[in-house]
């Protein structure tokens, strides 16, 4: 396991903010208001809006975790001239 995988596998005990912190970047990437997007976690099956997720900012990028089981659902990294959005433990992404 490399350092990035290790960071993504174990959520910090605290230091998270709600999903509104990542909504702006996700809205740019997806072309719509991200706070109303519904995600379904591939690990536990929980359905929730992006605004309800837990976002960790002290990581390489922004790590978006399921509010029910803490599975890493999305990794957002702002790179020079591009935004990288990696969907991880998501069974379904519903765009209203």
Image (tube, rainbow, N blue to C red):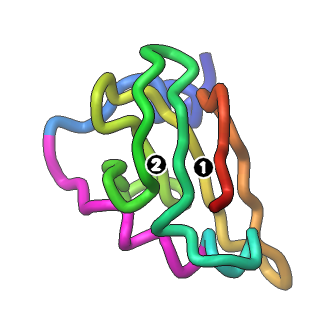
Residue 11's disc is none
The magenta segment is: 14-25
Is residue 38 positioned above or below 67 on the image?
Answer: below
SS label for mark 1: strand
Residue 75's disc is 1
Q: Tag 1 or tag 2, which sits nearer the N-term?
A: 2
* Residue 7 spot, x, y in % from top left: 45, 34
* Residue 3 spot, x, y in % from top left: 55, 32
The structure residue drawn at horizontal position 49% and vertical position 34%, both measured from the top left corner, is 72
Q: Is residue 23 magenta?
A: yes
* Residue 27 spot, x, y in % from top left: 63, 76
Is residue 85 positioned above or below 31 on the image?
Answer: above
Is the C terminus in the top left, top right, bottom left or bottom right quadrant? Answer: bottom right
SS label for mark 2: strand
Q: CA distance from mark 2 to mark 1?
A: 6 Å
The structure residue drawn at horizontal position 56% and vertical position 58%, both measured from the top left corner, is 37
Horizontal side of 91 relative to 12 (left or right) equals right
Horizontal side of 46 relative to 32 (left or right) equals left
Image quadrant where residue 2 sits: top right
Image quadrant where residue 13 sits: top left
How packed mark 1 is, by other alpha carbons closer than 10 Å (few <14, some 14-19, many 20 or more), is: many
Is residue 57 positioned above or below 21 on the image?
Answer: above
Residue indicated by mark 2: 64
Q: Is residue 63 magenta?
A: no
> Do the residues under discs 2 and 1 have CB atoms within 8 angstroms?
yes
The structure residue drawn at horizontal position 37% and vertical position 71%, both measured from the top left corner, is 20
């Amino acid at each position: 396991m490399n350092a990035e995988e290790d960071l993504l596998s174990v959520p910090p005990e605290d230091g998270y903010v709600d999903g509104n912190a990542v909504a702006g970047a996700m809205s740019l990437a997806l072309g719509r208001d991200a706070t109303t997007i519904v995600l379904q976690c591939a690990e536990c099956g929980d359905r929730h809006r992006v605004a309800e997720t837990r976002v960790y900012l002290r990581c390489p990028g922004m790590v978006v975790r399921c509010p029910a089981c803490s599975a890493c659902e999305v990794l957002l990294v702002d790179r020079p001239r591009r935004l990288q959005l990696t969907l991880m433990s998501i069974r379904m992404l519903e765009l209203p």
